[in-house]
Amino acid sequence: MRDKIVIITGATSGIGKALTFHFAKLGSKVVIGARNIDKLTQIADEIRQAGGEVAYAQTDVSIDNDCRNLILTAIENYGNIDVLINNAGISMRALFDQTDLQVIKKVMDINFWGTVYCTKYALPYILKRKGSIVGVSSIAGIKGLPARSGYSASKFAMSGFLESVRTENLKHGLHVLVAFPGFTSSNIRSTSLSGTGTEQGESPRDEGKMMTSETVAGHIYNAVIGRKNKIVLTGQGKLVSLLNKFFPDMLDKMVYKSLANEPNSPFK
């Protein structure tokens, strides 16, 4: 991936931040987008101080023109695009019948439409390079999780969209990877939306027992090099994928029990 031009959304925290530093450290030219301009500037300064190459654009992926601008930032600075990593995402935690529909819409706008917008504008350039499009999904994109209805819906939609794009371009040399991390240590649960749209503020799970964002980034990097179509990460994620295929009813009960035991679970 040395000297390849790599766009990463949601680049200022969690998996996105880890991906940014991983690709930059190994010689890629990274183009990063996120809503927080101060954090973008700080990360860009760190990469440059370490001898890396980086460009950035303040980006809310739920806004069409922001996504277009991020892609144009890559073209204006480097002339090409080799890899687009659709990582920006937000979660939610509330029972569906207690969730304002605007919360579901916000999650879909960021997780699904953000992927659609960025992919739409980057695709012509990536096809010229026979490059890669990556979607960072979740085990919630393999198994619909209770109290995460909007989040699961957005990740299922992302996967279906990217699979369609892959198949449409089978003869054009396009590589499409969908990554399904299990529970990963990041800030996505602390920023998860409640049923009314407020941030949860703290994680309901033990973050210290999860796969780190840096480990996930390493797996995604290797999967891009290997041009894999799909990776499922963590033992728990692989187990969920397997059980959902062969024992879906049993998995329903297991998932319900696990999430019902979370602190301040909405099931209680």
Image (cartoon, rainbow, N blue to C red):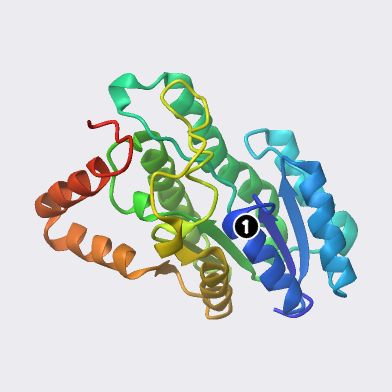
Q: Left or right of 129: which side holds 164?
A: left
Q: Which of 179 and 47 is in front in this view?
A: 47
Q: Is residue 226 above or below residue 100?
A: below
The residue at the point 56 percent across, 38 percent down is 110
> Which residue is depicted at the point 73% across and 41% down?
59
To which quarter of the image does residue 133 belong? bottom right
The residue shown at (37%, 68%) is: 234
Residue 28 is situated, as x and y percent measured from the top left of the image, at 75, 73
Q: Position of residue 246 (x, y in %)?
A: 13, 62
Residue 143 showing in the rendered view: yes
**Percent x, y for residue 72?**
81, 49
Where's the N terminus, which quadrant? bottom right
User: Would you say 177 lies left or right of 7 here?
Assistant: left
Location of residue 3 by image quarter: bottom right
x%, y% of residue 17? 66, 59
Element at label 1: helix
Q: Quadrant of the C terminus?
A: top left
Q: Is 199 above or below relative to 227? A: above
Q: In this view, does 113 lie above or below 54?
A: above
Q: Is residue 237 left or right of residue 48?
A: left
Can residue 72 be spotted in the picture?
no
Placement of 110 over or under 221, stated as above or below: above
The amino acid type found where label 1 is placed reads: Gly
Rate crowding at label 1 as few (under 14), some (14 to 19) or many (20 or more) other CA atoms within 10 Å.
many
Q: Which residue is label 1 attached to?
A: 16
Image point (53%, 54%), residue name? 186
How many circles with numbers are drawn on the protein?
1
